[in-house]
Amino acid sequence: MDEKNGIRITKENIEFRRRLIETQGAEKLMRCYLCGVCTADCPVAMRVKEFRPRRIARLAAFGQRDRLLGTDTVWLCVGCYTCYERCPEQVKVSEIVSALRKLALKEGIVHPTYKALMESIAEMGYIYEIDDFQNEMREDEELPPAPEPDTEEVEAIMRKTGFLDLMEGG
Ligand code: SF4
Ligand code: SF4
């Protein structure tokens, strides 16, 4: 066991890092040299002081599963890809966040907000209900009415990809 800058590193941490790096999108994690450019331009970091992409990369490099998956941190990213574009080492924090979410989902961890959004998509085909008001706004923009979703097809896709099973903790 080793300790560095208040971070405890165990065999479990090393194993978690290995799993993370093997997950699509997180392959370049260890290229991060903590320059902080990702944090400087992240729109979420500008508003939420607890959210720091550089810190996510650092904790991920030390395999700090509990500090990453045990909080809301990885669910706050809005996937704007600014960090992806800015990073001089192509570390892609946005993709590391996605990889962390995948690992979280495999452990049955999903933020309640995301769960509600996914349930809406499974039920309605949209993340919110499209009513007459929404379609009137579309009409104002000279857009056709929102298409009627085939919810059976949506659910079938979610089932076939294994997503629903993961959401249901299967
Ligand atoms: S992920 Fe990239 S931009 Fe962010 S701290 Fe690491 S090297 Fe710098
Ligand atoms: S993708 Fe996420 S972490 Fe990266 S800049 Fe956007 S909000 Fe921040």
Image: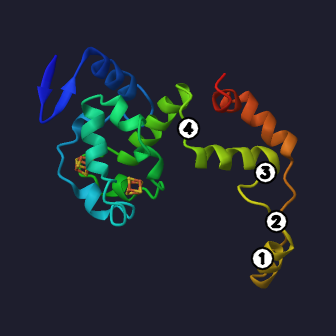
Left or right of residue 61: residue 130: right
Specify whether tag 1 is near ligand 2 (CB below 8 Å). no
- Nearer the observer: mark 4 or 1; the answer is 4
Marked residue nearer the N-terminal end (2 or 3): 3
- Kind of element beneath mark 4: loop
Q: Amino acid at mark 1?
A: Arg
Marked residue nearer the N-terminal end (1 or 3): 3
Where is residue 144 drawn, in percent x and y?
A: 83, 72
Residue at 21% across, 23% down: 9
User: Looking at the image, do the residues carrying marks 1 and 3 touch, with CB atoms under 8 Å apart?
Assistant: no
Q: Amino acid at mark 2?
A: Ala
What residue does disc 2 label? 146
Q: Gap in Å between the C-alphas at discs 2 and 1?
A: 8 Å
> How many residues crowd around disc 3 within 10 Å: few (fewer than 14), some, or many (20 or more)?
many
Left or right of residue 82: residue 145: right
Q: Quadrant of residue 95?
A: top left
Q: Amino acid at mark 4?
A: Val
- Nearer the observer: mark 2 or 3; the answer is 3
Height in image: 80 above or below 17?
below
Q: Which mark is residue 45?
A: none
Specify whether tag 4 is near ligand 2 (CB below 8 Å). no
Name the quarter where the N terminus is drawn.
Answer: top left
What residue does disc 1 label? 138
Q: Gap in Å between the C-alphas at discs 4 and 3?
A: 20 Å
